[in-house]
Image (spheres, rainbow, N blue to C red):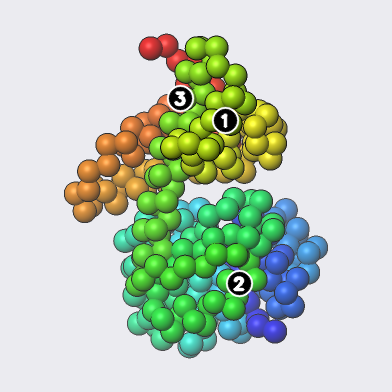
Amino acid sequence: MTAIGFIGVGNMGGPMAQNLVKAGHDVKAFDLAKEALQKAVSAGARAATSAQDAARDVEVVITMLPAGQHVKATYLGPGGILGAARKGTLFIDSSTIDVDSAREVAKAADTAGMLMIDAPVSGGTGGAAAATLTFMVGGSEAAFARALPILEKMGKTIVHAGGAGNGQAAKICNNMILGISMIAVSEAFVLAEKLGLDHQKLFDIASKSSGQCWSLTTYCPVPGPVPTSPANRDYQPGFTADMMLKDLKLAQQAATAVAAATPLGADAARVYSDFSEAGNGAVDFSGIIRMLRAAKR
């Protein structure tokens, strides 16, 4: 049994913490949202009174926070958790944040005598609940080796992507592909509708042809062909449009920093920004097909 502090037990962090409890670990949880914290406690975690309290007297601390500024404030700010934890604590940040912030916090952790990995996830709330998440990990070999048994209780695929920040780099590159491909699949179905081609027929052909991709075969944006996709639940989110927009913006920020040409990534960010600004930020990102369907050429 490992003593684990878990900071941020919301839609993603909550199920992840629950899986650690199920695996027999002693989990001390904290969240600013009382309802989220209570849910974690009901699942078997202990309640911490603050982020600092969650980081005290544990062997591992996991954070799942909204953005880079929250991660930096939690780790480095006044009363930050790096100062509260004992030497040698392993920190696992599963937030999706910018690469520079991830590397800054990792450097501070190393200076403080801690081990740290950035380990953003893919798989959505379903993957978090089923413990089938993909972890993209950046950090030292020693930190990765120590983290692996913990990550295995929350995920199915765990890849060490290299040094600090490389987990975040992998995540934003992956989600740029996802954002672009969902728009492409949605555009194809909208065009098929206007040409009189049945959804199922297009799916049957494209899913076995060169158009095959995850956005089509696992997360199809029209009802019917993939019964488990959000399109069959009126686009109730597994991964919201706002979350996709956040990742696309992070990808564009990184592309600008290293002078990488990402024209389709930039276009995808613009399309999702329009969708979000129209009041659809809480809709599943596959709901982008609604905006494309209503758009005029």
- Inter-mark Cα distance, 2 to 3: 37 Å
The residue type indicated by label 3 comes to: Glu
Residue 154 - label: none
Crowding at mark 1 (Cα within 10 Å: few <14, some 14-19, many 20+): many
- Inter-mark Cα distance, 1 to 3: 13 Å
**Which residue is tagged 1?**
203
Question: Residue 20 is drawn in which quadrant?
Answer: bottom right
Crowding at mark 2 (Cα within 10 Å: few <14, some 14-19, many 20+): some
Is 179 situated left or right of 63 in this image?
Answer: left
Viewer-nearest of labels 2 and 1? 1
Crowding at mark 3 (Cα within 10 Å: few <14, some 14-19, many 20+): some
Viewer-nearest of labels 2 and 3? 3
Residue 119 can be seen, yes or no: no
**Which residue is tagged 2?**
152
Of 168 and 281, the residue lying toward us: 168
Residue 151 can be seen, yes or no: yes
Q: Would you place residue 275 above or below residue 181 in this image?
A: above
Name the spot of residue 39 as percent of width and height, x first.
75, 58
The quarter of the picture where the C terminus appears is top left
**Which residue is tagged 3?**
187
